[in-house]
Image (spheres, helix red, strand yellow):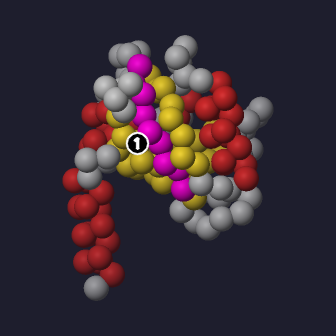
Amino acid sequence: ALDEQLAMLGSAIRQAEDAVAVLEVDYDSEPLPFAVHRFVNPCCARLLGYAPEELVGLRTRVLFGAETDVAAMRALQRSFVDGVALVAEFVLHRADGSPVRVDARLVPIDGTGARPRLWVITLRDVTEAR
């Protein structure tokens, strides 16, 4: 029954029209914690212009660029450190360097409190809405 539920969940996430990624946070990095993609659904890969296998293992930092708001990056770092969910709008940069504005929702997977290791983030392209 559990295998069937996991297969169904995996299928649902792969078919989702929002970008979904699982991030693992390294709290020992200096000067601030950073996150690495551990899973991305096909929509996430398309949105960011990478193949899924290119994103897995990639630091989220590479998605930040000249148009990414510093305050938004700091809010993301604070969420990681404090272990709290975040709803924010970011400008990320695709593999080709082009900007994409996203509505981001970040939630710790493995509990709340300081320093959760795993997080899920959903992204929705809101570039055209601007």
The span shown in magenta is: 99-107
Lateral position of residue 38 relative to residue 79, left or right: left
Secondary element at image label 1: strand
Q: Nearer the viewer, residue 23 or 84?
A: 84
Decide whether the magenta segment is chiefly helix, strand or loop: strand
Point out the residue furthest to the front here.
130
Where does residue 91 sit, x and y in percent of width and height?
48, 26
In the rendered view, tell whether residue 4 sits above or below residue 21: below
Asked whether the viewer can see residue 53, the reply is no
Query: Is 102 one of the magenta-colored residues?
Result: yes
Query: Quick one: quadrant of the N terminus?
Result: bottom left
Query: Is 11 one of the magenta-colored residues?
Result: no
Q: Which quadrant of the figure has residue 88?
A: top right
Residue at left 62%, top 67%?
A: 111
Q: Around disc 1, counting alpha carbons within 10 Å, would you say few (fewer than 14), some (14 to 19), or many (20 or more)?
A: many
Where does residue 11 sit, x and y in percent of width and height?
23, 61
Q: Nearer the viewer, residue 28 or 103?
A: 103
Residue at left 68%, top 34%?
A: 74
Q: Which quadrant of the figure has residue 32?
A: top right
Residue at left 25%, top 61%?
A: 12
Lateral position of residue 44 relative to residue 15, left or right: right
Residue named by callout 1: 123
